[in-house]
Image: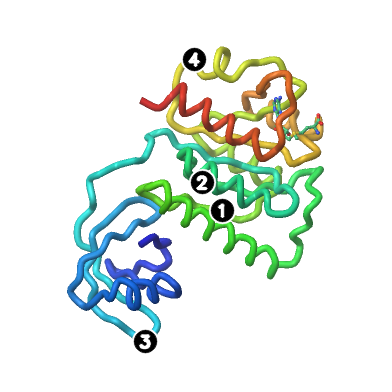
Amino acid sequence: YFCLDENIKNNNVVITGSDARHLKTILRAHVGDVISIVTTSNEFTAEIKQMCSDDIICELKNEVMRNNETNINITLCQGIPKQTKMETIIQQNVEIGVKTFIPLVTERTVVKLNEKDRELKKLERWQKIAKESAKQSKRNIVPYVDKVTTIKELINRLKLEDAEVIVPYELEDVKLLKDVLIEPKKNYYIVIGPEGGFDNKEIKMFQEIGAHIVTLGKRILRTETAGLVTSSVILYACDE
Ligand code: SAM
């Protein structure tokens, strides 16, 4: 079962909702059974301690040594696209191995997420997609979907990070594989514009903090394709 850190307290995990119902009614789990729990950082065995009416409480036992994770840490900062494209982006990039997502509001973001309610609902949905995709692709961690962030907030955060920042931009000639990934590093942030792309001022802000502005080729990729291509190339070049 996949759970977020907020469901773990003092070595105890609370399994809720459909996961708890699945364990009870389909798998007919009992107190004393040992199950597998995957958190945002690792996988554990856990013993069922209590079956409550809605929830199941388990105690974490041992860390599982099997590791399907890449040691390359990729954070995908994605300009929020229209409709449900963000869901596809999260699902596919989790399969590839991306560890964190930052939904990004840029100058040309069309979708407005002003109402706090809607924002939280979307985040909940995106986190659920990440969890399901992690389960399907046998990840050892649940990739984290961070809060909706503006370009300025992202730039301030990146100034403090020890990471390579990769910004694909269609008006650039620098090649990701040949010019940037010559010496593999551990931490990468990928920043992808929404459907309308980046404003030139935004690109300047990234240049000022030493980001690598790169081309992904002469053809224009959809915003949902660009992140996946970039994360694939980084893992191809850097993962052992
Ligand atoms: N509005 C832009 C245009 O029509 O020229 C296209 C934006 S594209 C759909 C969305 C994002 O994907 C861009 O902001 C960029 O980050 C990335 N992207 C797409 N194709 C790219 C390419 N060939 N090289 C670099 N980045 C690309």
Q: Which callout, 2 or 3, points to the residue nearer the camera?
A: 3
Q: Nearer the viewer, residue 137 or 157?
A: 137
Give me the C-alpha separation between circle 2 and circle 3. Answer: 33 Å
The residue wearing badge 4 is 182
Please, is residue 72 above or below residue 144 in the view?
Answer: above
Local secondary structure at mark 2: strand
Local secondary structure at mark 3: loop
Answer with mark 4 or mark 2, whichever residue precedes in sequence.
2
What's the mark number on residue 100? 2
Q: Are marks 2 and 3 in contact (CB under 8 Å)?
A: no
Check disc 4 and give the amino acid type: Ile
Check disc 3 and give the amino acid type: Ser
Q: Report the side of 11 relative to 186 (left or right).
A: left
Local secondary structure at mark 4: loop
Q: Report the side of 74 relative to 40 (left or right).
A: right
Q: Nearer the viewer, residue 24 or 67?
A: 24
Please, is residue 134 above or below residue 191 in the view?
Answer: below
Residue 74, percent from left and from top:
50, 37
Q: Nearer the viewer, residue 80 or 93?
A: 93
Q: Quadrant of the C terminus?
A: top left
Residue found at x 48% / y 51% = 133
Check disc 2 and give the amino acid type: Thr
Give me the C-alpha separation between circle 4 and circle 1. Answer: 29 Å
Q: In which of the image's four quarters is ligand 1 placed?
A: top right
Give me the C-alpha separation between circle 1 and circle 2. Answer: 7 Å
Residue 179, percent from left and from top:
58, 13
The residue wearing badge 1 is 146
Q: Are marks 4 and 2 in contact (CB under 8 Å)?
A: no
What's the mark number on residue 53? 3
